[in-house]
Amino acid sequence: MPNIKSAIKRTKTSEARKAKNIQQKSAMRTAVKRFETAADENAENKTELLSSAVKQLDKAAQKGLIHKNNADRKKASLMKKANA
């Protein structure tokens, strides 16, 4: 454990950020999985779930949780599933 006040604060803030990042990444993954299961079952609300998943992916890319190209690749894959 650090002894210096600024190092203590740094540890505290980095832990808080880590928890928030994990939460946002988990929400993104959940949105993608919900859409994928709806697309497999050909559910009625799959367009709503698609827009939700795309929104989550865009937010994650904007905040730096995932790379922009990674988000674009996942969105393209979801769009293919939506049209199939």
Image: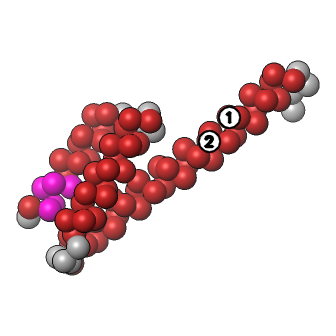
Q: Residues within 10 Å of mark 1 (few under 14, many from 20)?
A: few
Q: Residues within 10 Å of mark 2 (few under 14, many from 20)?
A: few
Q: Secondary structure at mark 1?
A: helix
> What secondary structure prevails in the magenta region?
helix
**Residue 68 lies in the magenta-colored region:** no
Residue under numbered circle 1: 14
Tag count in the figure? 2
Q: Nearer the viewer, residue 69 or 54?
A: 54
Direction from residue 33 to residue 14 in the image, left or right:
right
The residue shown at (55%, 49%) is 22
Amino acid type at image mark 1? Ser
Residue under numbered circle 2: 18
Image quadrant in which the N terminus is located: top right
Q: What span is colored magenta in the figure?
A: 78-82
Instruction: Measuring from the top left, give residue 74's x and y in whole percent.
Output: 26, 47
Q: Quadrant of residue 66?
A: top left
Q: Against 35, is 58 above or below?
A: above
Q: Secondary structure at mark 2?
A: helix
The residue shown at (49%, 50%) is 24
The reply to whether dot 1 and dot 2 touch (C-beta < 8 Å) is: yes
